[in-house]
Amino acid sequence: MIRGKPVSVRRLKRPIELLFNLEHPEELAVVTEVNEKQDDGEELIEDEADSSPDELQRRFDKMTFVVATKKLEQLSHWVKVTDVFKTDEDAPFLERAGIEKVSDPRFKNYSQRLARLRGIRKYIYRMDVLERNLSYNEVTEIFVRVNSLGAKLRSSDLALAQITSKWRNSLKIFQAFQQECAKAGFDLDLGLYLKT
């Protein structure tokens, strides 16, 4: 996305585009995860299925980033992250949001938010390259320890890392079992099979 292109994810037909909410609240209370099974970008997650369109919109308005939907893309305060990274100019986004003058109270706020978003490009990402002579078990242990304080991982992610370090090719076995179950009408997340 930093390069101005949507992210292609395996098993998804279309690349994922993220939207940035220029009106997001300062204190964030909601975290959104990508549903990898989603084809059209419009499918709802379980707890949203019974929500009215107004309730859903209120939830989205509390978020900073969401996976793009056609409906949200049409709202003037939601901008494509890739579009923001393609240019250093704020004018197209401010005009779309209906800001015509510098005296508009939203002008400074939106400009600062767009600058902070672009600031992600300057973030230095740490990468550790491990020696080739380490065992699979040692590499997995490093992975688990490094990620336990950083990225939010599900317990099934950590379990999968530990299992595959000791049982080679087990991931292929789990995925094959998952596909068999899906054919029988039980299309569940791989993490659920790992837990059982």
Image (cartoon, rainbow, N blue to C red):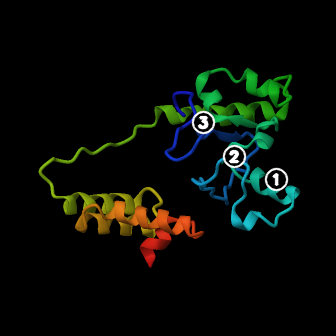
Q: Amino acid at mark 1?
A: Gln
Which residue is painted at 59% across and 53% down in the image?
A: 34
Q: CA distance from mark 1 to mark 2?
A: 18 Å
Give left or right: position of 98 versus 169: right
Q: Nearer the viewer, mark 1 or mark 2?
A: 2
Q: Image point 73% across, 34% down: which residue?
A: 110
Label 1 element class: helix
Which residue is outermost to the left?
133
Tag count: 3
Q: Residue at x 82, y 31 (%)?
A: 97
Q: To which residue does mark 3 refer?
A: 117
Q: Nearer the viewer, mark 3 or mark 2?
A: 2
Mark 1 touching mark 3, by CB under 8 A? no
Q: Nearer the viewer, residue 54 or 70?
A: 70
Picture layout, residue 116 above or below residue 177: above
Whole-Å distance between the Cαs marked 1 and 3?
Answer: 22 Å
Residue sitting at the far front: 184
Q: Position of residue 19 (x, y in %)?
A: 68, 40
User: Which badge, 3 or 2, comes first in the chain's sequence?
Assistant: 2
Q: Which mark is residue 57?
A: 1
Residue at 86% from the left image edge and 29% from the top image edge? 98
**Residue 157 place in picture, x, y as percent:** 42, 64
Q: Residues within 10 Å of mark 2 (few under 14, many from 20)?
A: few
Q: Secondary structure at mark 3?
A: helix
Q: Is residue 62 left or right of residue 148?
A: right
